[in-house]
Image: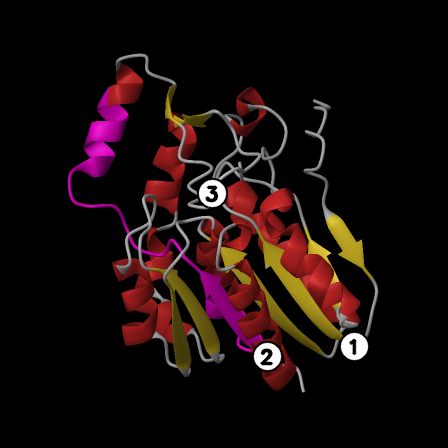
């Protein structure tokens, strides 16, 4: 089924040097939340791929037809395709995109570096899966939107106005191995954590610090909420990311 892409939510592809960067957006989000950092990397000469994950940037009904296997499969395919064209490839991911970054780095030991922005890598709290399935059985198909958690006044993320519950269940159940395999990550990592985040708890970042086998540098963002790429600390986030990429892609 062909579904129109929301304006501004198109993917980005830029052919640059032999150093590549894969940029991954979050759950119910789309490439618009990551476009600025992707364009900055492209301006620096990197080969950049910012894909639109299946079901995102279109309609909630479209997203309801997709699962973690679709999102993770698309992300891994994008990495492999980029790795065929580039000598070195790093990954930047926001929220679920951070979980996908971990997922790829766990399976591809030659990832040059990982940038995690308020990543989602931990399994849900005990009992949450059962509660979610009970809601589905009761006929509840969507819940309140988790998008646009931005502190900066006047900034609104172009995310969905609600959250598809079946997709939440898939994320909760099918992505469990990501947390279990964090020790498989050997690439150096930059972790950017918002001090106040209303979507993902900071212990997700703690898990990366504690379990990754590669070195992890953590920077706390004091003036941003979950979608930090659009928030008050955007310049700090982007500058730190570019400095990190210059080191790992040297």
Q: In the picture provided, is 17 more to the left or to the right than 128? A: right
Q: Quadrant of the C terminus?
A: bottom right
Region in magenta: 105-134
| Residue occupying the far front of the picture | 153
Q: In the picture provided, is 216 more to the left or to the right than 93? A: left
| Residue 110 visible in this rendered orientation of the protein | no
Is residue 234 or residue 62 the one in the foreground? 234
- Helix or strand or loop: what does disc 2 sit on? helix
Return the residue at label 1.
18
**Does residue 106 belong to the magenta stretch?**
yes
Is residue 102 or residue 77 the one in the foreground? 102
Q: Position of residue 132 (x, y in %)?
A: 26, 29
Q: Which label's residue is closer to the chain start, 2 or 1?
A: 1
Q: Position of residue 235 (x, y in %)?
A: 57, 64
Asked whether the residues under the numbered discs 2 and 1 touch, taking CB atoms below 8 Å apart as contact, a structural biologist would say no
- Helix or strand or loop: what does disc 1 sit on? loop
Task: Please report the residue visible at 72 percent of the width from the left and 40 percent of the height from the top.
Answer: 10
Of circles 2 and 1, the one toward us is: 2
| Residue occupying the far top of the picture | 139
Return the residue at label 2.
243
Q: Which label's residue is closer to the chain start, 3 or 1?
A: 1
| Residue 152 visible in this rendered orientation of the protein | yes
Return the residue at label 3.
68
Of circles 3 and 1, the one toward us is: 1
Is residue 25 or residue 172 the one in the foreground? 25
Q: Residue 14 is drawn in which quadrant?
A: bottom right
Q: Residues within 10 Å of mark 2 (few under 14, many from 20)?
A: few
Q: CA distance from mark 3 to mark 2?
A: 31 Å
Q: Position of residue 46 (x, y in %)?
A: 75, 71
């Amino acid at each position: 089924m062909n579904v129109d892409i929301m304006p501004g939510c198109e993917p980005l592809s830029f052919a640059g040097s032999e150093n590549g960067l894969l940029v991954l957006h979050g759950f119910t989000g789309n490439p618009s939340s990551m476009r600025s950092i992707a364009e900055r990397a492209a301006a620096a000469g990197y080969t950049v791929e910012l894909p639109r994950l299946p079901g995102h940037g279109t309609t909630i009904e479209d997203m309801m037809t997709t699962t973690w296997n679709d999102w993770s499969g698309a992300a891994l395919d994008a990495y492999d395709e980029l790795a065929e064209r580039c000598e070195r490839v790093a990954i930047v991911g926001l929220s679920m995109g951070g979980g996908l970054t971990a997922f790829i780095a766990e399976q591809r030991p030659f990832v040059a570096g990982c940038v995690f922005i308020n990543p989602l890598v931990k399994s849900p709290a005990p009992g949450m899966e059962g509660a979610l399935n009970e809601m589905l059985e009761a006929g509840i198909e969507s819940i309140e939107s988790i998008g646009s958690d931005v502190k900066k006044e006047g900034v609104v993320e172009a995310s969905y106005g609600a959250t598809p519950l079946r997709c939440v269940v898939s994320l909760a159940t099918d992505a469990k191995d990501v947390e279990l395999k964090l020790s498989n990550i050997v690439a150096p990592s930059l972790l950017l954590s918002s001090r106040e985040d209303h979507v993902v708890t900071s212990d997700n970042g703690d898990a990366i610090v504690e379990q990754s086998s590669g070195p992890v540098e953590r920077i706390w963002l004091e003036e941003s909420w979950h979608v930090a790429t659009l928030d008050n600390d955007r310049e700090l986030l982007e500058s730190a990311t570019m400095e990190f990429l210059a080191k790992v892609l040297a």
